[in-house]
Amino acid sequence: MKRKLAAILLATSVGIGAVTVPSQAQVFGGGIVFDPTNYAQNLLTAARALQQVNNQILSLQNEANMLLNMGKDLSSLSTSELSTMISGLTGISTLMDEGRGIAFNVEATTAAWKSLYPGSYPVGTATATFATNAQSRWQQAMDAFQQALQVQAQIVQNVQSDSTTLTSLVNASQGAVGNLQATQATNQLLALSTKQQLQLQNLMAAQYRASALEAARNAESEAAAQSEFSTFLGSSRAYTSH
């Protein structure tokens, strides 16, 4: 009976060993089993997992760079020359408003024109009236020329300042880190160009005003001289022969 039981146990142990150890596996001391096929599969799985991790890291880096670029695109320009431009235009506007005589106002111009440039005078107008009006017209012409010179001087000063402003804006445009900064720099450059055009318009208005007043003064002097001459001659009946 004991011999039969031992034979059964021996057969069972041999069967178990044949099932658990693969044909390519190697059995080492201490019961350690090494399966090269299983090891290769595990190594391949680990490599694929590492590749996935690397891909995720690269994706996160790309997203970080994208957010950084978006931040740069939305970054505002630190340089603003708008206050300097407005200050220059304000100086010219003040000079234009300070013009004496006929102002740059339609109603005021019309009223002054009717008073000092009537174009004709009734016979018998006093000499003192001609002299007073002529003096007023001369003063207005002189004021207009003075204003034109002042506007010219102010514009020259502004142009000197504009050269510094232009340099600052060009440098800011070239050093822009994003679309917003580039757009803001471009807008300020356009504003500088608009300012210079407005300066020229004011200068032309001042110069044309001075020229127009001088031409009107000469024409009015001729009209006044003709009226004075008519007053001097009087009626033709005063010189009838006896």
Image (cartoon, rainbow, N blue to C red):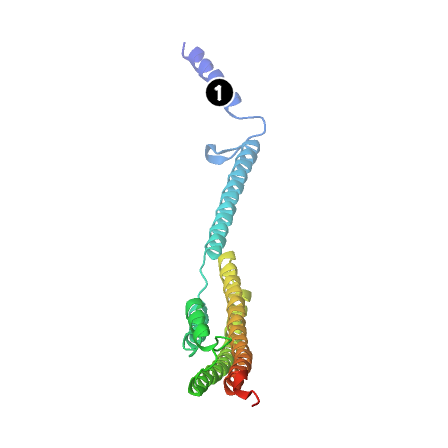
The residue sitting at the front extreme is: 242
Q: Is residue 49 above or below residue 241?
A: above
Q: Nearer the viewer, residue 20 or 181?
A: 181
Say which quarter of the image contains residue 116.
Answer: bottom left
Residue at 59%, 29% in the rendered image: 24
Q: Which residue is mark 1?
A: 16
Q: Nearer the viewer, residue 132 or 146?
A: 132
Tell me where residue 213 appears, x and y as whole percent. 51, 78
Q: Is residue 54 above or below residue 235?
A: above
User: Local crowd at mark 1 within 10 Å, few (<14), some, or many (≥20)?
Assistant: few
The residue sitting at the bottom extreme is: 242
- Residue 103 in view in this figure: no
| Number of dots carrying numbers | 1
Tell me where residue 100 appears, x and y as whole percent. 42, 79
Q: Is residue 64 above or below residue 138?
A: above
Tell me where residue 153 appears, x and y as whole percent. 50, 82
